[in-house]
Image: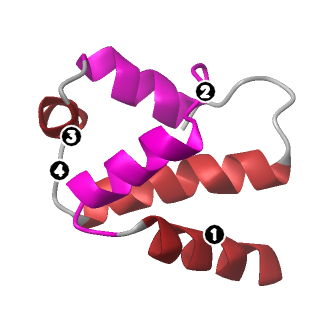
Amino acid sequence: MTTRAGSSPAHAAFLQELIRMRTQAGLSPLQLAERLGVKESAVTRGEAGTRRVGVLELQRWAFACGSTLEEFGRRLEARALQ
């Protein structure tokens, strides 16, 4: 995975969790984009860290992947505690 230069470990974990959520749902970037009504590049750039993903968008992503914002937060927090 390529992330923006200088990203923090926390940001890298956030991006990894975005990808994990999508892949665990069995979705390609294109399939997720279609569910969200956006271009595939919005998903791939968001996952690469070259485009900001805000909290409201994150909530939509989680729902589209069959998850919740709360579950995403728990998984991200668990990564931070490792």
Alpha carbons under labels 1 and 4: distance apart: 20 Å
From this viewpoint, is residue 17 visible? yes
Alpha carbons under labels 2 and 1: distance apart: 17 Å
Query: Considering the numbered disc 4 on the image, is that residue within a helix, a strand or a loop?
Result: loop
Give the mark nearest the N terminus, 1 or 4: 4
**Can you say whether 39 is above or below 73 in the image?**
above
Mark number for residue 32? 3
- Of residues 1 and 7, which is closer to you in this image? 7
Left/right of residue 24 with respect to residue 8 in the rendered view: left
Rendered location of residue 29, percent (x, y): 25, 35
Query: Considering the numbered disc 1 on the image, is that residue within a helix, a strand or a loop?
Result: helix
Identity of the amino acid at label 1? Answer: Leu
Tag 4 residue: 27
Q: Residue furthest front?
A: 56
Q: Is residue 27 magenta?
A: no
Q: Are marks 2 and 1 in contact (CB under 8 Å)?
A: no
Alpha carbons under labels 4 and 3: distance apart: 6 Å
Identity of the amino acid at label 2? Answer: Arg
Q: Quarter holding the C terminus?
A: bottom right
Q: Are marks 4 and 3 in contact (CB under 8 Å)?
A: yes
The residues colored magenta run 39-67
Give the mark nearest the N terminus, 4 or 2: 4
Tag 1 residue: 76
- Of residues 19 and 33, which is closer to you in this image? 33
Mark number for residue 52? 2
Give the mark nearest the N terminus, 4 or 3: 4
**Can you say whether 64 is above or below 1 in the image?**
below
Alpha carbons under labels 3 and 2: distance apart: 17 Å
Query: Considering the numbered disc 2 on the image, is that residue within a helix, a strand or a loop?
Result: loop
Give the mark nearest the N terminus, 3 or 2: 3
